[in-house]
Image (cartoon, rainbow, N blue to C red):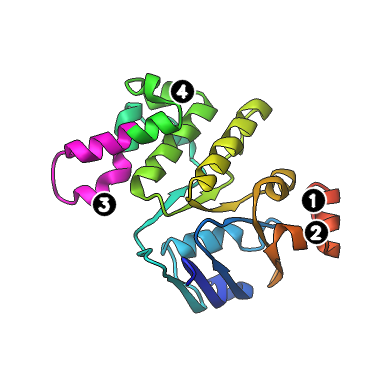
Amino acid sequence: MPQLSCRDVSLGYDGKTIVSGLTFDVNKGDYLCIVGDNGSGKSTLMKTILRLQTPLSGKIETGDGVAPNEIGYLLQQTAAQKDFPATVLEVVLSGLLNRAGMRPFYSKTEKQTANENMETLGISHIAKKCYRELSGGQQQRVLLARALCATRKIILMDEPAAGLDPGASIEMYTLIKNLNDSGVTVIMISHDIIASVKYASHILHIGREKTLFFGTTEDYLKTDIGKLYTHTGGDTV
């Protein structure tokens, strides 16, 4: 049974359809990259999966033991969020708010979870530093650790390497792949088509108004659109 199922979904705003007929499944351990032109509905799809907005039609459902609130996320930051005046530990712990509920404190187990995730992402040594003083790559690691505190089942990411230098980008992609290899299902929006086909197990290519491809990365690279898109580096096709 899929962890996430999308069935004949149409997305848009104010009744205007951006993309329609989206149908795909994400199974445990998949690494799905969502690619396509600007304005094709990629970010809208992610917001809909997170229930931040509703589809115009169709259904998005979770399964295989995954509840709707057990999807972690790492969205693109605003300038204000990058300047957030909190420690690294405080930001990571905030991923546990759903578990803490109305309690004004975190339990010993929750603090241990945060520490373990910081260790996994290699940021334990900066736990007491202020988040806004970190480099872009360090901030992304902190946000990824925060997402892992929310869940280790599915993590959605919107351009996690955007704005990072080449070295930091490689480190981020390597960390994400390691998490995926450990059993975390990854769904990522990416304009980096080279990294997408290198790391992802599956590709969802959205065009304006319709799905252009969904399937394994191996099969995607055999299609005309896959060949063209990787050749042009993800430019408009």
Which mark is in front, 3 or 1? 3
Q: CA distance from mark 1 to mark 4?
A: 31 Å
Q: Earlier in the sequence, mark 1 or mark 4?
A: 4
Q: As shown in the figure, which amino acid type bears the numbered disc 4?
A: Leu
The residue at the point 13 percent across, 41 percent down is 104
Q: As shown in the figure, which amino acid type bears the numbered disc 1?
A: Asp
Residue 98 among those drawn in magenta:
yes
Q: As shown in the figure, which amino acid type bears the numbered disc 3?
A: Asn
Image mark for residue 226: 2
Left or right placement of residue 18 versus residue 51 in this view: right
Image mark for residue 235: 1
The residue wearing badge 4 is: 134
Which mark is in front, 1 or 2? 2
The residue wearing badge 3 is: 98
Which mark is in front, 4 or 2? 2
Give, as a single range, the part of the protein colored magenta: 93-115
Percent coordinates x, y for residue 62 in the rendering: 42, 69
